[in-house]
Image: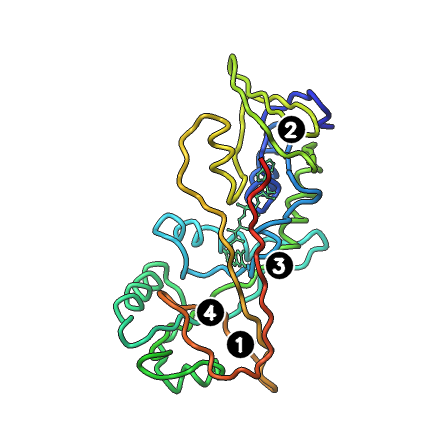
Amino acid sequence: MGLDAMTRADAVVIGGGIAGLSVAARLAKEMRVGVLEAEVACVYHASGRSVAFAHFGLGDRIVRTLTALSLFEFREMESVSGDPIASVHPALHIARADQRGELDALQEVHDRFECAYEILQDAEIESVMPTLKIGPEYAHRAILDTGSLRLDTDAMLQRHLADLKANGGSLVTNAPVRSTVRDAGLWSVETLAGSFQAPYLVNAAGAWADEVARMAGVSTIGLQPRRRSVIFCPKAPGACLPRPWTRHPVRLATPRRKSWTKRSRRTGLRPLPP
Ligand SMILES: Cc1cc2nc3c(=O)[nH]c(=O)nc-3n(C[C@H](O)[C@H](O)[C@H](O)COP(=O)(O)OP(=O)(O)OC[C@H]3O[C@@H](n4cnc5c(N)ncnc54)[C@H](O)[C@@H]3O)c2cc1C
């Protein structure tokens, strides 16, 4: 299907990030689908900047249940060239002494989802992540999740895009949605790249999903685009395993050494122009 101006599809997906492309690839097996992306290319925003770890440290019960359900698919999923898209990479959840309650709650989550993990204390934490400051007021107790996955997001997105196109779906870039109107069971979607119509409209606009919701006259959920930073450091010399993806349940611990290689990835989550 070529989703040219005024083309009628069965479903129009707004947003060409991981959410939009993955849902579009699945829908395309059943119906004619078009994806509208505001930017010049897909995954320009959060999906192109993600560290792409699948672990149980994020989200509420619903998100964690979705994580559990996704892990199986991630392990099975192959890139377009047939390589796996996921590899096991440990995740370290650190806490100060006064954050024991939060860490215990996270341990319960790991038990509930039957994760493989170890509880580490002080020197044991330092042995897996030597750059951390150790002690009751810093990294004191931790969960080392040994089953978490690092995902190749680029391979995932290429896979979804290939599946979408193989099933006749289309992607239109440079197509910021400016208005959506529903009439007689049909959504009319106006973009800078033309007008599109479909009975089903999927809002996958990421941090801007509330703006799209407002256009469509449905309730918002209070989303705000925010900037996030991530620090990368190299694998320890001679180490077999990579350093764990490290996070805290409440607040970041202070890195001890300034000399370690660090690279900050800023998300640049800017609001789209109206
Ligand atoms: C630095 C960083 C690290 C992260 N690490 C992890 C991690 O380790 N594990 C994890 O699970 N998650 C992580 N995340 C979160 C994860 O990346 C996001 O949850 C995910 O990428 C969101 O995907 P999305 O498709 O919903 O949004 P996006 O990727 O932002 O896609 C939304 C798309 O919609 C488009 N759009 C918006 N408005 C319109 C419009 N009006 N018309 C047309 N198109 C529009 C945008 O241009 C954008 O391309 C991280 C995020 C960041 C920034």
Is the residue marked 2 within 8 Å of ligand 1, measured from its CB? yes
Assess whether mark 2 and mark 1 are in contact (beta carbons under 8 angstroms). no
- Identify which amino acid the numbered label 4 is placed on: Ala
Instruction: Say whether disc 3 or disc 4 marks the residue closer to the N-terminus.
Output: 4
Give how far apart the Cα atoms at labels 3 and 4 are.
16 Å
Q: Residue at point 67% right, 42% down?
A: 39
Q: Secondary structure at mark 1?
A: loop
Tag shown at residue 152: 3
Instruction: Say whether disc 3 or disc 2 marks the residue closer to the N-terminus.
Output: 3
Instruction: Say whether disc 1 or disc 3 marks the residue closer to the N-terminus.
Output: 3
Q: Secondary structure at mark 2?
A: strand
Give how far apart the Cα atoms at labels 1 and 4 are.
9 Å
Tag shown at residue 243: 1
Give how far apart the Cα atoms at labels 1 and 2 are.
45 Å
Specify the quadrant that holds the N terminus. top right
Circle 2 residue: 191
Instruction: Say whether disc 1 or disc 2 marks the residue closer to the N-terminus.
Output: 2
Q: Nearer the viewer, mark 4 or mark 2?
A: 2
Instruction: Say whether disc 1 or disc 4 marks the residue closer to the N-terminus.
Output: 4
Instruction: Say whether disc 4 or disc 2 marks the residue closer to the N-terminus.
Output: 4
Give how far apart the Cα atoms at labels 4 and 2 are.
41 Å
Classify 261 as above or below 172.
below
- Identify which amino acid the numbered label 1 is placed on: Arg
Assess whether mark 2 and mark 4 are in contact (beta carbons under 8 angstroms). no
Q: Residue at point 60% right, 70% down?
A: 263
- Pick the residue in front: 199 or 118: 199
Q: Position of residue 113 (x, y in %)?
A: 36, 59
- Identify which amino acid the numbered label 3 is placed on: Asp
Q: Around disc 2, counting alpha carbons within 10 Å, would you say few (fewer than 14), some (14 to 19), or many (20 or more)?
A: some
Q: Position of residue 53 (x, y in %)?
A: 52, 61
Circle 4 residue: 91
